[in-house]
């Protein structure tokens, strides 16, 4: 579970990141990120109704949060992140989901240099 200080919760924060942020796309998800002055970085997870009913959506959110909790020390603290899941993510197991999330963060150059 993500620490409370690392969670993005307010609607206005989500709206700001969507409006001002940049996007990095992967096959099964994409990441929207925007700069922030507030440390540490915060992460929000969005899983739409297209993914499935509530049980499936919550399962995907739990998995994404667990993965983000693992790679959180490697993320750059200059940004706030929103991870948006595409409907295809429901077919991935935990290991594939982890490699997908890691590769999207790496593609966007959002990981610290010393964390390779």
Image (spheres, grey):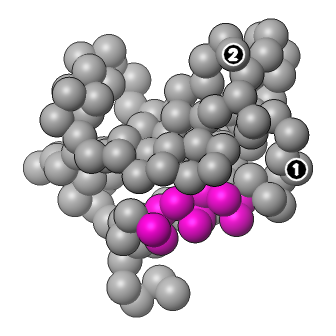
Residue at (63%, 50%) from the top-left corner?
Answer: 27
Residue 26 is situated, as x and y percent measured from the top left of the image, at 56, 52
Residue shown at 58% from the left, 67% from the top: 103
Find residue 108 and report its horizontal and vertical position in percent: 38, 64
Would you say residue 68 is visible in this rendering? no
Note whether residue 77 is visible. yes
Between disc 1 and disc 2, whose residue precedes?
A: 2
What residue span does the magenta drawing correspond to?
98-107
- Alpha-carbon distance for marks 1 and 2? 18 Å
Q: Classify residue 50 as left or right of residue 42.
A: right
Image check: 99 left or right of 47?
right
Give the labeled residue for mark 2. Answer: 50
The quarter of the image holding the N terminus is top right
**What percent of the width, then of the height, locates residue 112?**
37, 77
Prevailing SS of the magenta stretch? helix
Relative side of 111 to 18, left or right: right
- Tag 1 residue: 93
Residue 99 is inside the magenta segment: yes
């Amino acid at each position: 579970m993500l620490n409370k200080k690392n969670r993005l919760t307010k609607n206005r924060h989500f709206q700001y990141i969507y409006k001002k942020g940049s996007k990095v796309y992967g096959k099964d998800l994409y990441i929207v990120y925007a700069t922030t002055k507030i440390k540490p970085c915060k992460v929000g997870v969005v899983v739409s109704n297209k993914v499935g009913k509530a049980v499936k959506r919550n399962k995907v959110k739990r998995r994404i949060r667990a993965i983000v909790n693992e790679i959180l020390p490697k993320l750059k603290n200059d940004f706030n992140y929103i991870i948006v899941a595409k409907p295809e993510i429901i077919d991935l197991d935990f290991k594939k989901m982890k490699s997908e999330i890691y590769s999207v963060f790496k593609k966007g150059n959002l990981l610290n240099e010393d964390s390779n």
